[in-house]
Image (cartoon, helix red, strand yellow):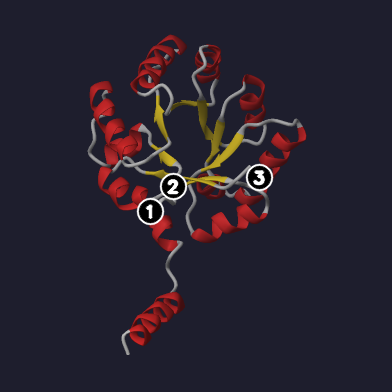
Amino acid sequence: MTLRLLLDSADPGAWERWLPTGLFFGVTTNPTLLKKAEQPCELGHLRQLSGRALGLGAQELHLQAWGSTATELLRCGSALHAIAPNRIVVKVPVTTTGAEAAKELISQGIPITFTACYEPAQVLVAAALGARYIAPYLGRISDLGRDGHGELIAMQRCLDGVGSSVRLLVASLRHPSDLTRLAAAGMTTFTINPAIAAGLFASGATEAAAAQFEQDATA
């Protein structure tokens, strides 16, 4: 698998800043990010937002379904996917309710991202059902006093061990070094916020070299 980065933000301003760089394959969102960006979590508004993200070049837009039952998640997920059938990936939590809804969505050809993954065994749910992605929360796992990096490496090994094509979509990164460490361990798919994206370019030595090139070019 090749490297795939997604921008973890529901802020259209961040999309306009980062999507034109070509760095990101797409965008991931959820109701919490929408609330943070002061964007309503409503189907009509998400349709408008989706148009903006896709117009800026996002190849995939991950939208999270909401509902307290599998039927509600299924109905919401189907409506979200219909916004742009070739570009929308529907997110559901990796719960029994989410799995029930995901089974039906996948049977309809709708790609799924399982989200809120905290346990290595949960990746086997994604593999068994044929999801496209599963998103473990690296930083939040570490916040529980566990070895987040070690557990994500175990998750990747589980997927590799069963020959699954599910992508481990690493979320909740706290520092660019999280990305480089896990990439070195063989992971290829990450969703990162704008601050982490900026951190990928944060090198005083690089800035100084670039400034010297410009100075020498006009000397």
Residue at screen point 74% across, 31% down: 163
Hey, which quadrant is residue 35 in on the image? top left
Nearer the camera: disc 1 or disc 3: 1
Marks 3 and 1: in contact by CB < 8 Å?
A: no
Cβ–Cβ below 8 Å for labels 2 and 1?
Answer: yes
Hey, which residue is sitting farthest bottom in the picture?
219
Residue type pointed to by label 2: Phe
Q: Position of residue 173 (x, y in %)?
A: 49, 51
Q: Which residue is mark 3?
A: 151
Examine the image and state in which quarter residue 216 appears: bottom left
Quickly name the residue at label 1.
21
- Label tally: 3
- Amino acid on which disc 3 is placed: Glu
Of residues 33 and 9, which is closer to you in this image? 9
Q: Position of residue 14 (x, y in %)?
A: 30, 49
Residue 115 percent coordinates (x, y): 50, 32
Where is mark 2, residue-wise? 24
Callout 1, which amino acid? Thr
Residue, far right: 161
Q: Position of residue 209 (x, y in %)?
A: 43, 80
* Quadrant of the image containing the N terminus: top right
- Binning the other alpha carbons within 10 Å of mark 1 as few (below 14), some (14 to 19) or many (20 upward) gives few
Please determine whether, in this image, residue 28 is positioned above or below residue 94. below
Q: Secondary structure at mark 3?
A: helix
